[in-house]
Amino acid sequence: MIDLKNKLILITGSTSGIGQACAYAFAQSGAKIALTGRNENRLSALAKELNDSGTDCFFYNCDLTDHESVISLKAETHNFPTTVEPFNGAATGSGGEIRDRLAGGCLLYTSDAADE
């Protein structure tokens, strides 16, 4: 098992399906969580729930189908307090496309979950 304690995991599509399930699992593993998705209300509610349970969690509203939104999120990762381990829970685009657009070559796992 990979030690995720205090690692920062950025999860796309984190407000439903596999992305949301992974947010809970990563939180239980002691990871810090950066949630992303299109639905700001759900992002805020999930971040509050995870923070209330003791997880260091924050969120960014990001639509992976919008190039400018992805570029903005990628720019924000430079302000994160540590190295980011991206996890793609969104069912938008191909794994390679999202990997190239968001992670700039980092390993990015893919799933079949959609944000809405």
Image: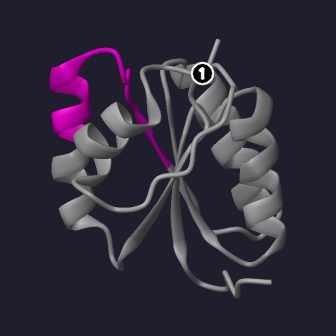
Q: Nearer the viewer, residue 107 or 66?
A: 107
Left or right of 20 in this view: 111: left
Left or right of 52 in this view: 95: left
- In magenta stretch: residue 65: yes
Residue 58, x across and y down, in percent:
51, 53
Q: Nearer the viewer, residue 26 or 59?
A: 26
Residue 103, x across and y down, in percent:
30, 52
Disc 1 marks a residue whose amino acid type is Asn
Residue in the picture at 82% in, 43% down? 21
Residue 70, x across and y down, in percent:
25, 32
Residue in the picture at 34% in, 15% down? 65
- In magenta stretch: residue 11: no
Location of residue 52 by image quarter = bottom right
Left or right of 17 in this view: 37: left
User: Quarter of the image containing the C terminus?
Assistant: top right
Q: Nearer the viewer, residue 37 or 17?
A: 17
Residue in the picture at 74% in, 78% down? 30
Looking at the rendering, the stretch of residues picked out in magenta corresponds to 59-73
Which residue position is annotated with label 1? 41
* Mark 1 nearby-residue class (10 Å; few <14, some 14–19, many ≥20): few
Residue 93, x across and y down, in percent:
42, 21
Location of residue 94 by image quarter = top left
